[in-house]
């Protein structure tokens, strides 16, 4: 499990104690091929780290105008926006093959903030950087279509 967490970009720069807290408070879960893990519009307070398998991230899931935003593999994560804000989920995430995940709740991040505020700051900066990278990618895709 540690090897998976150490591959996750938003956990880069965290010390051993912070990584261990995240591991200790994570919950392993399985998503069978084709199953929906989270749905656009639902309330959520968890993010997920992909241990194995692959997921696809979609807007307007299962509609004629569905848009696939990304495919994510082991070492990637999703759902971090629900950790940062209390708005409904922005996309649906579906397992492609059978997928193993580690779920982290917003409460875990609160524990990190209370116990290691400096490590929490590193994590938030990493999340902001990753969100910026993803937004740039979507901007490039959108501008190429117009």
Image (cartoon, grey):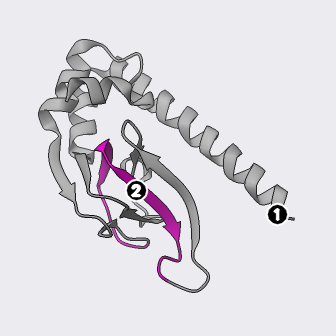
**Crowding near the residue tagged with mark 2, few <14, some 14–19, many ≥20 C-alpha atoms within 10 Å:** many
Q: Nearer the viewer, residue 88 or 10?
A: 10
**In this view of the protein, can residue 74 be seen by the observer?**
yes
Q: Residue furthest front?
A: 97
**In this view of the protein, can residue 115 be seen by the observer?**
no
* Residue 74's disc number: none
Q: Is residue 54 on the magenta stretch? A: yes
Residue 86's x, y, as percent? Answer: 39, 59
Vertical placement of 5 versus 119: above or below? Answer: below
Q: Residue furthest bottom?
A: 64
Q: Quadrant of the N terminus?
A: top left
Which range is magenta? 41-62
Q: Quadrant of the C terminus?
A: bottom right
Q: Is residue 132 left or right of residue 34?
A: right
Q: Is residue 112 on the magenta stretch? A: no
Q: What residue is at 58 percent from the left and 86 percent from the top?
A: 64
Vertical placement of 92 versus 49: above or below? Answer: below
Judged from the image, the secondary structure of the residue bearing numbered disc 1 is: helix
Asked if disc 1 and disc 2 are in contact, CB closer than 8 Å, the reply is no
**Crowding near the residue tagged with mark 1, few <14, some 14–19, many ≥20 C-alpha atoms within 10 Å:** few
Q: Is residue 57 left or right of residue 145?
A: left
Residue that label 2 marks:
55
What separation in Å lies between label 1 and label 2 (alpha carbons)? 24 Å
Give the total number of marks visible in the rendering. 2
Residue 131's x, y, as percent? Answer: 56, 42
Q: What residue is at 33 percent from the left and 67 percent from the top?
A: 43
Residue 124's x, y, as percent? Answer: 44, 32
Q: Nearer the viewer, residue 35 or 38?
A: 35
Residue 32's x, y, as percent? Answer: 23, 63
Vertical placement of 129 versus 91: above or below? Answer: above
Q: Is residue 108 left or right of residue 59?
A: left
Residue that label 1 marks:
145
């Amino acid at each position: 499990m540690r090897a998976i967490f150490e591959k996750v970009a938003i956990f880069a720069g965290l010390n051993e104690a912070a990584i261990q807290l995240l591991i200790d408070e994570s919950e392993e879960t399985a998503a069978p091929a084709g199953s929906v893990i989270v749905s656009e519009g639902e309330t959520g307070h968890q993010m997920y780290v992909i241990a194995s398998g692959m997921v696809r991230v979609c807007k307007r899931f299962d509609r004629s105008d569905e848009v696939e935003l990304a495919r994510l593999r082991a070492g990637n994560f999703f759902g971090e926006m629900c950790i940062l804000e209390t708005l409904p989920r922005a996309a649906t995430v579906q397992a492609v093959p059978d997928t193993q995940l580690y779920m982290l709740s917003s409460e875990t991040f609160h524990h990190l903030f209370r116990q290691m505020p400096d490590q929490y700051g590193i994590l938030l900066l990493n999340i902001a950087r990753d969100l910026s990278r993803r937004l740039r990618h979507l901007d490039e895709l959108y501008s190429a279509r117009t």
